[in-house]
Amino acid sequence: MRHVLIATALVLASAPAQAQGKKAFAMESSGSSDRTFLASYTVLNVNPSEMTAHFELNLGGLGAIALEGGVQGRYQHFSDKTVLETGESLESEAKGIALLVARYTDGPTMSGFFWALGLGYRQVDAKWAVKPEANDPDLGENVDMSLLDTSERLNHAGTIKGNTGHFRVGYRYTANEWPILIGAYLGVRHFAGTVADTQPDSQVQDEGDG
């Protein structure tokens, strides 16, 4: 089974001291020292539970290539009000990696307006509880009671993993004297994942006790 997820993200990034590489060119650009590499991490994301680390290598001022890794902690996709009123929920945890190429208006310093394209891989572990329909096949004569919780919601769990495609546009500022960068981008992530069902926690625990 194939699924496609299109998501947008607005991210602010900050770079620590090791972000500034050695000077690679004789010329200066926009009054800033040229950089051979940048290392950064996200400090603000649309999904607050997701953190991303980013290492980028300058390709002679003509572009850049970046390796990016991210981890998403447990995240509840429904509002607290929805969970309380309906008993339904959707929680997920994820991790992924991507390789991107980018072009900047100020290539030697990897700053200014930019676009980026990339490919990657992502795995999402999800758990959800839903109100069953009257004709739900899980509610047959031989229903597995471990699938039902105290609020009579069906518990499901699954792993979604597969390739990702990335496109971003944004702006980045890099300080001249200080090893600091601040930027923002708007991105689209295309996720073509294959879904594999796993056992809910309650069912795994019951089998272990037996």
Image (tube, helix red, strand yellow):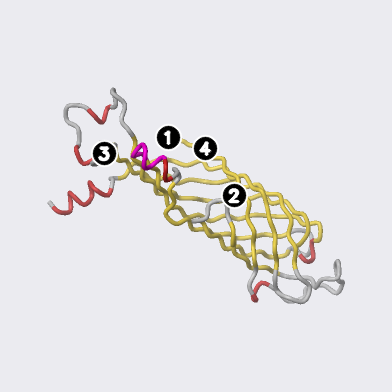
Q: Secondary structure at mark 4?
A: strand
Q: Are marks 2 and 3 in contact (CB under 8 Å)?
A: no
Q: Tell me if residue 118 comes above or below residue 23 in the rendering.
A: above
Q: Nearer the viewer, mark 2 or mark 3?
A: 3
Judging from the image, what secondary structure is the residue with disc 1 in? Answer: loop
Asked if marks 3 and 4 touch (Cβ < 8 Å), the reply is: no
Q: Element type at marker 3?
A: loop
Name the residue tied to disc 4: 4
Residue marked by disc 2: 119
Give above or below for 22 relative to 139.
Answer: below
Q: Which image quadrant is residue 151 in?
A: top left
Residue flagged by tag 4: what amino acid is it?
Val
Relative to 15, 197 lies left or right: left
Q: Is residue 114 left or right of residue 75?
A: right
Looking at the rendered image, the disc whose residue lies closer to the viewer, 2 or 4, is 4
Image coordinates for residue 116, horizontal then vertical, percent: 69, 51
Q: Earlier in the sequence, mark 3 or mark 4?
A: 4
Q: Residue furthest left?
A: 210
Instruction: Classify mark 2: residues with Cα within 10 Å, few (<14), some (14-19) or many (20+).
Output: some
Q: Which residue is mark 3?
A: 151
Please tell me which residue is depicted at 36% across the width and 45% down the height of the picture: 127
Left or right placement of residue 181 versus residue 75 in this view? right
Kind of residue indicated by mark 1: Met
Residues shaded magenta: 82-88
The residue indicated by pointer 1 is 1
Q: Is residue 85 magenta?
A: yes
> Badge 4: how crowded within 10 Å, few (<14), some, or many (20+)?
few
In the figure, 14 relative to 199: above or below? below
In space, the residues marked 3 and 4 are separated at their CA atoms by: 31 Å
Of circles 1 and 3, the one toward us is 3
**First in residue order: circle 1 vs circle 3:** 1
